[in-house]
Image (cartoon, helix red, strand yellow):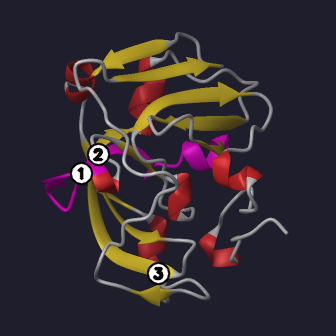
Amino acid sequence: MIISPDTKRGQRIPPGQSQTVKWPVLDASGTPPIDMNKWRLDVFGLVEKEVSLTWDEFMALPRVEVFSDFHCVTRWSRLDNTWTGVAVSTLMELAGGVKAEAKFVSALGYDYGWTTNLPIADFLMEDALVATHHDGVALTPEHGGPARLIVPQLYAWKSAKWLGGLELLAEDKPGFWERNGYHNHGDPWKEERFGY
């Protein structure tokens, strides 16, 4: 199991946050319908070899477990989560590696063109994964199932629900919430909530 570095802090609740045992459901436009017969995870852009995985191909990849905390920009934190899925590093290996000019990632959701952006350094952290399970249970659609990105070091909106693609980029490409007032980076320990 991979242990997220944030769980080793003496104080695990970032500034301005309150702990919850519940897992509130938040999204911009509702849960999208996803046809699992057509589901794909595309890895493209500045990688050595573009990859397009079916659900069965994705589920056949090596699995990891990540123990982490989960911080929402709306000021709640849920501690002690166990995520199961495919490590970002495994996906990048499958794509032949990341090209040197790749500095950012755009995560693309199935929810009507929704995206979020991440610096490559955050995306490639050891505890980042594409999760299919939370605390041993398959992710429900309202929580981003069948698969969502999990980047524990950043606020939860950067952990894109209903993940369908990962585009590696040389230039930053702000996503839906970043274009609508949220901070471009989203570090909960620096309270990077809003961009204005």
Residue 149 position within the rendered picture, expressed as x and y whole percent measured from the top left: 43, 45
Specify which label sits upstream in the sequence, 1 or 2: 1
**Residue 78 horizontal side relative to residue 189, left or right:** left
Query: Is residue 126 magenta-colored?
Result: yes
SS of the residue under disc 1: loop
What's the residue at 24%, 19% (across, down)? 57
Q: Are marks 1 and 2 in contact (CB under 8 Å)?
A: yes
What's the residue at 53%, 10% (across, down)? 49
Separation of disc 2 and disc 3 at Cα?
21 Å
What's the residue at 30%, 74% (across, down)? 80
The region drawn magenta spans 119-141
Q: Classify the position of the N terminus by image quarter.
A: bottom left
In the figure, residue 87 lies in which quadrant?
Answer: top left
What's the residue at 42%, 28% (across, down)? 91
Q: Which residue is mark 2?
A: 145
SS of the residue under disc 2: loop
Separation of disc 1 and disc 2 at Cα?
5 Å
Would you place residue 95 above or below residue 81 in this image? above
Residue nearest the observer in this picture, 136 or 144: 144
Residue 47 position within the rendered picture, expressed as x and y whole percent measured from the top left: 59, 18
Q: Residues within 10 Å of mark 3 (few under 14, many from 20)?
A: many
Q: Which residue is mark 3?
A: 76
**Residue 19 horizontal side relative to residue 74, left or right:** left
Would you place residue 68 above or below residue 47 in this image? below
Q: Which residue is mark 1?
A: 139
As drawn, the residue found furthest toward the left would be 136
Residue 167 position within the rendered picture, expressed as x and y whole percent measured from the top left: 60, 27
Would you place residue 72 above or below residue 122 in this image? below
Specify which label sits upstream in the sequence, 1 or 3: 3
Specify which label sits upstream in the sequence, 2 or 3: 3
Task: Report if residue 18 is visible in the image.
Answer: yes
Separation of disc 1 and disc 3 at Cα?
20 Å
